[in-house]
Image (tube, rainbow, N blue to C red):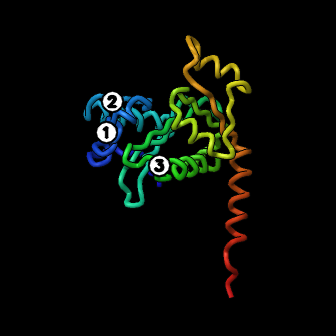
Amino acid sequence: MLKKRELTWHECHALYDLMAHPDVFPFVRQKAYSYEEFMFVTKQTIEAEERGELISRTIIDEWENPIGTINLYDIEGLAGFLGTWIGKPYHGKGYNILAKESFFQELFFEKEIETIYMRIRNENIRSRKAAEKFPYVIQANETRPTIFKQLNQDKYLYDLYEVPKDLFTMNYIRHSNESEELQPLEA
C-alpha cells in the first residue's frame, strides 16, 4: 500500500500524469508544472526526508503501481501536517483510507509522532468528508485556535483537523481485538 519515494522514471512519470489532472492539481501541496520539475521536487522531497524535515511515501495499488503520495510536512516537535493526493482514476475506491491508516501506523508506532494535523481547504468538500469518516479525527478549529489562526491569517481558507496518537491507538487496538474475536479457532 505504501513505499518510500523513489526517483525512478516509472514512478515519477506515473505520479506526474496523475497529479496533473485538473481535479487533483489544485489540492497538491508540492505542485510541478512539468515532468522535469516533478523529478526535481521528488529529489528535494527525498533529501528533505533524509534530513528529518518530512516523511513521504508513495501510495501504490494492489499491483504496486504508484497512484498518489502521502506526506507529513512541517514536522516540529512530535507533530506535523498531513498532505495526501490520489490520482483521479483511483478516487472512491478505498485507497485513501488504506493509505492513511497505514501511514498513521508508521508515524505513531515507528516514528514517534504524537499529533497529525490536516489543513483542508473549506471548499474541498470531498477531503473534508473523507477526514470526518475516521473515528479518530477531531475537527480542531476551536480546540487549536493558535494553529487555526496561523492557517487563516488573511481570510478563512482552511479547516483544521487533528489526529491524536491516543485516539488512533485506541481505535487501532479496538479494531485489532474485534478482528481477533472473529477469527475461527484452530482445531
- Find numbered disc 2 in the image and state the secondary structure of the residue it sits on: loop
Q: Earlier in the sequence, mark 3 or mark 2?
A: 2
- Residue at x-position 34% and y-position 33%: 22
Q: Nearer the viewer, mark 3 or mark 2?
A: 3
Which three-letter amino acid code belongs to the residue tagged 1? Tyr
* Residue 100 percent across, percent down from the top left: 55, 47
Which three-letter amino acid code belongs to the residue tagged 2? Ala
Residue 92 has which mark? 3
104 shown above or below 21:
below
Q: Nearer the viewer, residue 126 or 175?
A: 126
* Residue position for label 2: 32
Q: Nearer the viewer, residue 122 or 97?
A: 122
Q: Nearer the viewer, residue 152 or 53?
A: 152
- Find numbered disc 1 in the image and state the secondary structure of the residue it sits on: helix
Q: Earlier in the sequence, mark 1 or mark 2?
A: 1
Residue 16 has which mark? 1
Which three-letter amino acid code belongs to the residue tagged 3? Gly
Quadrant of the drawing holding the C terminus: bottom right
* Residue 173 percent across, percent down from the top left: 72, 57
What is the CA distance from the residue labelled 1 to the residue labelled 2?
8 Å
- Residue at x-position 55% and y-position 49%: 97
Q: Are marks 3 and 2 in contact (CB under 8 Å)?
A: no
Q: Earlier in the sequence, mark 1 or mark 3?
A: 1
